[in-house]
């Protein structure tokens, strides 16, 4: 069968038994790959009907959602898969970190981080496309955050805006990045990521791991197929119950109060509200530096592939602390901030 022959090219003939045990990877890489596939297919469909001009973009999204057959489902799937991929990529990154699987795989870890950066950029550029009040002002806040990047910030902000203000030029740039350059770069990087995984000899495994081998066909194919089907079923279910939002058309003269960044940047917005230096420069640089340097910060002698290995405990704790504090900041920014960014007591 042709499809099977193709799969034989992508996989090694034999795998370790632990590769298909659920606790080894939690299926997160495959789940991420499924979301990416759904995003490319639904994204291409939306591309056929969308026009990146401020006068028509909003009407086009309305048309896709209300009059086009299955249009709402396709748009919801795209929205759900984009957000799910962000969450799954963070969990996958955490799984790789907490099993020390970056060890001896520094290049693939770096490819992964580049993928994650592209993922944030893809979400951010896509956010603006509906041209509604929330997306317009979120992009406004987000592009304000770009300006804080030391040295490059103001130039990068102008490049993204296509001038000094958010408008038609920005929408065109966001669209070109979102529907052209970023998906292309992501497909190339994902191929490199998976190729590197094979070059590195498959998943990281401690030397004492059982060396029992299984044929990839059918064991790995079944495991990957099950994760892909489960992920797809979950995405469709979520798309049926959680429609992609569309608020009133963007009004550049009337900002909502408060104007919030997209949820994944709200943690940094929260920090910026206390200190621009901390939230805009110090924290993002420290976080990115810590992740980039992880394979070299780990001085232990334990090989990768083991969850929460004792000698790596301090590094794992630091990682969890950073992750949880970022989540807490997102929670505060998203749910506990009201007008003029004043604290909203929920009870
Ligand atoms: C679109 C995003 C991504 C996709 C589609 C993807 C896909 C995959 C897949 C299918 C695997 C093998 C199975 C598994 O580990 O679950 C894998 C492994 C790996 N990924 Fe990713 N990944 C993505 C993002 C990332 C990120 C953000 C990182 C970390 C910075 C990362 C680092 C790694 C590493 C180091 C491995 C090898 C793990 C090992 O040897 O045990 N990946 N990835």
Image: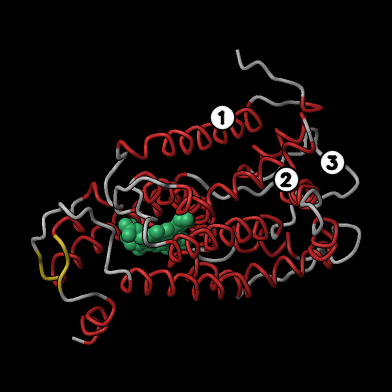
Q: Is mark 3 within 8 Å of ligand 1?
A: no
Q: How many marks?
A: 3
207 in relation to 262, above or below: below
Q: Quadrant of residue 102?
A: bottom left
Asked whether residue 298 appears in the rendered view, the answer is: yes
Residue 257: x and y, percent?
80, 33
Pick whichever of labels 2 and 3 is earlier in the sequence: 2
Q: Which mark is residue 255?
A: 3
Asked whether residue 35 appears in the rendered view, the answer is: no
| In the displayed structure image, the side of residue 25 where residue 1 appears, left or right | left
Name the foreground residue: 202 vs 301.
Answer: 301
Pick whichever of labels 2 and 1 is earlier in the sequence: 2
The residue carrying pointer 1 sits among few (fewer than 14), some (14 to 19) or many (20 or more) residues within 10 Å by Cα, namely: few
Residue 54: x and y, percent?
81, 63
**Secondary element at tag 2:** helix
Name the foreground residue: 159 vs 169.
Answer: 159
Q: Residue at x 54, y 72 (%)?
A: 45
Q: Residue at x 66, y 15 (%)?
A: 345
289 in relation to 218, above or below: above
Q: Residue furthest top?
A: 347
| In the displayed structure image, the side of residue 200 where residue 91 appears, left or right | right
Pick whichever of labels 1 and 3 is earlier in the sequence: 3
Q: Which mark is residue 134?
A: 2
Q: Which mark is residue 328?
A: 1
The residue carrying pointer 3 sits among few (fewer than 14), some (14 to 19) or many (20 or more) residues within 10 Å by Cα, namely: some
**Secondary element at tag 1:** helix
Q: Nearer the viewer, mark 2 or mark 1?
A: 1
Q: CA distance from mark 1 to mark 3?
A: 26 Å
């Amino acid at each position: 069968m042709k499809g099977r022959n193709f799969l034989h090219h992508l996989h090694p003939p034999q795998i370790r038994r632990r590769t298909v045990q659920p606790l080894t990877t939690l299926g997160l890489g495959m789940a991420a790959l499924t979301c990416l596939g759904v995003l490319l297919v639904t994204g291409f469909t939306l591309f056929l009907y969308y026009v990146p001009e401020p006068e028509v973009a909003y009407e086009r999204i309305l048309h896709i959602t209300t009059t086009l057959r299955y249009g709402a489902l396709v748009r919801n799937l795209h929205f759900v898969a984009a957000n799910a991929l962000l969450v799954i990529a963070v969990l996958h990154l955490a799984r790789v970190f907490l099993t020390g699987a970056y060890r001896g795989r520094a290049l693939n870890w770096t490819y992964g981080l580049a993928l994650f950066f592209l993922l944030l950029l893809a979400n951010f550029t896509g956010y603006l496309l509906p041209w509604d009040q929330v997306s317009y002002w979120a992009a406004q806040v987000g592009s304000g955050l770009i300006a804080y990047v030391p040295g490059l910030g103001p130039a990068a902000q102008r490049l993204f805006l296509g001038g000094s203000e958010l408008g038609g030029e920005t929408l065109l740039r966001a669209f070109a990045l979102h529907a052209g350059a970023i998906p292309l770069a992501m497909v190339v990087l994902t191929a490199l990521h998976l190729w590197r995984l094979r070059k590195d000899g498959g998943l990281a495994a401690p030397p004492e791991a059982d060396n029992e081998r299984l044929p990839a066909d059918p064991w790995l194919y079944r495991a990957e197929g099950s994760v892909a089907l489960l992920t797809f079923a979950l995405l469709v279910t979520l798309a049926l119950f959680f429609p992609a939002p569309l608020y009133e058309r963007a009004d550049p003269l009337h900002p909502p109060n408060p104007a919030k960044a997209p949820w994944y940047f709200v943690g940094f917005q929260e920090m910026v509200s206390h200190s621009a230096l901390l939230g805009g420069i110090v924290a993002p640089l420290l976080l990115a530096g810590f992740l980039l340097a992880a394979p070299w910060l780990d001085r232990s002698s334990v090989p990768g592939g083991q969850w929460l290995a004792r000698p790596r405990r301090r590094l794992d704790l630091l990682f969890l602390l950073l992750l949880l504090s970022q989540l807490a900041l997102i929670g505060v920014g998203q749910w506990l901030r009201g007008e003029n960014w004043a604290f909203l007591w929920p009870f």
